[in-house]
Amino acid sequence: MSSWLECPACRQIVPAAWNKPSCPHCANPLPQRRPGSLARSAAFAIAAAIMLVPAYTLPVMSIERLGRAHADTIFNGVWKLWNQGMWGLAIIVFTASLLVPAMKLFGLALLIAASRWRGLASAELLARLHGLLHFIGRWSMLDIFLVAFLCGIVRFGGLASVGVRPGAVAFAAAVILTMLATAAFDPRTIRDAAENSLRTPTPT
Amino acid sequence: MTGIGQAKAPLSFATVSRTDGCLALSATALIFYIAGLSLPLAVAAKFGEKHTGYLFSGVASLWESGNWHLALLVAVCGAAAPIALTTSLCVLLFAARARMPRPGLRRWLHLAARVEQWSMPEVHMLGVIVAFTKLSALVATDPGPGLWCYGLAAFFTLLSWRNFDAADLASVLFPPGRKEESG
Amino acid sequence: MNAKNDNTSRSLSIVWLVPLVALIASGFLIYREFSDTGPQIEIEFENGSGIEAGKTTLVHKGVAVGIVQEVALKPGLDGVTVTVELDANARGLAVEGSQFWLVRPEIGFSGVRGLDTLLSGARLGVRPGSGEPRRRFEAMKKAPPNEEIVPGRNFVLRSPKLGSLLAGSQVYYREVKVGAVEDHRISDDSTEVLISIRVFEPYDRLVRADTKFWNSGGISMKIGLLGGRVESNSLESLMAGGVSFATPDDAATAEPAAEGAVFELFDDAEKSWLKWAPKIPLAANGS
């Protein structure tokens, strides 16, 4: 489930992103490709895309003030921040909650496609892309942490309180699924794809 | 290994080894996590009634309201994973520094590898800061000492992870008998 | 051995200052945090509704001085024990004689009180006592009419019935408000009602051992052979009930009644009482 490989001989941990054919310490060959990683990655990615639908359409957070509750979706939240003049915050939340997940899904789609259909893009680029996805993946959790924090501190009884709505759960699920999808994707498949497209095709 | 003659300079920059530095950073992160979790993150006041929020206040209120999945997620990504990560680093680096290779140490390395992608205190920090700013429009909010400590913990976690050289460490702790230089 | 990892110099490298500073700073902050909290006290309430652990605060003179930690049923299931953690600077509240109560919104003829609790939820109020430190308290059933400590004295009135007296009903002397009813309960042998009143300074010295108290609220109607007569005090006492008292003329020689002294509450005043006019100086250097 992680992008670390374990050398079967000396049990050394080697990051998959290093793309080393053999263990740097005992020179044993590292396992070339985890079976089914592409399918797993695709499955997670599709599930994530599905979860994003309720995540964006359902409200994520409700603020209750003086007995009146008002629920906001992610879009609403960003819009309100913008209207209140907090442009920086609006941009941050927009990026983290809307741009990043979209980019991740798009990037994943690209990676998976490139692994199936060789020659779509250079191996170098794709490896970089994978690393990038791995890095930015976590930032889409921003909104979840935001809601959790507000929930914990705004508890003034009837005066003001914050509640979590189903949209947040869907969003959290989507984020986790994208992270799992990125992790399940074995970057070695990119290299395989690139190499195989250079040699005469041999049945694998 | 006893001190060699040039132990004249008690504090020196030049002899900072990577292991030392990384261990110091990890230890610092761990200390600040403990402080950040036990000190209040923020104090919100309205109509003379004040409410003190801790890191786990959010988790607790999520749990109580039935959202145990979200509570677990925040607890893991915000606290459990980073603490597991820094603890693993501390254990490993300390063992490397003290030159005490033990077979059980491999588990710590595996733990660090598994847990690293779920450790996101910096995202948590940003989320809290954004929430803070949004909150001060609603109620009078004061940042608490816990916030600063947690922020520093996140910062030092990042630093120590960047400086962590798994391959190097493994060569010290788990020498297979024949070593090769690795990148 | 790989020289890169060799710590040849056993001298401390400067990098260890970082965790050291972290340790000191964190230790200091944590110490400061936990020394800010004061003692824990336990208050017994009949009913815990509205009291929430971690949320309900104890407020004194408009400032939050403590917070409820826990609300638990008493072992006998006949009430709840509320554990409150006081702020460090409020530890003077945990003493003999301190009175605690639950503030709820009340709209009565003594005024409107505690309305903010409608919005913020219930809170606890306190009137500090003085004396030995104490940890367990029994809550008052109702908030005293004046949450500020108004100097004065408390007395107890005995009566066969409550007579439409509420907490906050006024106490009158010569139809002037000089105090208020605070609380009431049925006596231990269930034969009468005990009513606690507070008479404010400087009027408390008007109460002597032979002072007579009567229920002057509501409307009393005397329909007799010579016609009817409707009497009532102010409109307020008409609605909220009230107690009046009068002191015999020879009061100048009697001592002011002690705190907590018990009197009988009569239904009505005898005519002679209304004529009493003792000279009792109210100024500070009076008797």
Image (cartoon, rainbow, N blue to C red):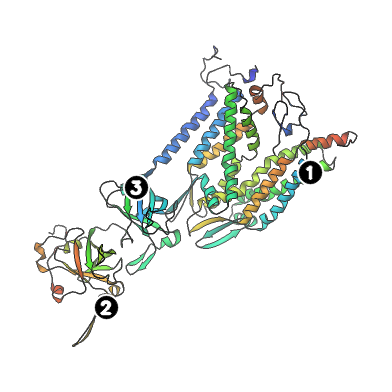
Horizontal side, residue B95 vs residue C88: left or right: right
- Which SS class for mark 2? loop
Query: Label 3 neighbourhood size at 10 Å, few (<14), some (14-19), many (20+)?
Result: some
Q: Which residue is mark 1?
A: A112
Chain containing the residue with disc 3: C
Q: Is residue B128 left or right of residue B43?
A: right
Q: Residues within 10 Å of mark 1 (few under 14, many from 20)?
A: some
Please determine whether, in this image, residue C21 is positioned above or below residue B123: above
Residue C53 x/y as whole percent: 44, 52
Instruction: Report the front residue among B158 and C124.
Output: C124
Secondary structure at numbered mark 3? helix
Q: Which mark is residue C284?
A: none
The answer for how far apart the CA atoms under marks 2 and 3 are is: 46 Å
Q: Say left or right for C23 vs C158.
A: right
Q: Quadrant of residue B75?
A: top right
At label 1, the amino acid type is: Ile
- The amino acid pointed to by label 2 is Ile
Residue at the image position 51 percent from the left and 48 percent from the top: B57
Residue A18, percent from left and from top: 74, 31
- Residues at badges 1 and 2 in contact (C-beta under 8 Å)? no
The type of residue carrying mark 3 is: Ala
Looking at the image, the residue that sits furthest to the top is: B5
Q: Residues within 10 Å of mark 2 (few under 14, many from 20)?
A: some
Which chain does the residue under circle 1 lie in?
A: A
Eyeballing the image, is C152 above or below B146?
Answer: below
Q: Which of pointers 2 and 3 lies earlier in the amino acid sequence? A: 3
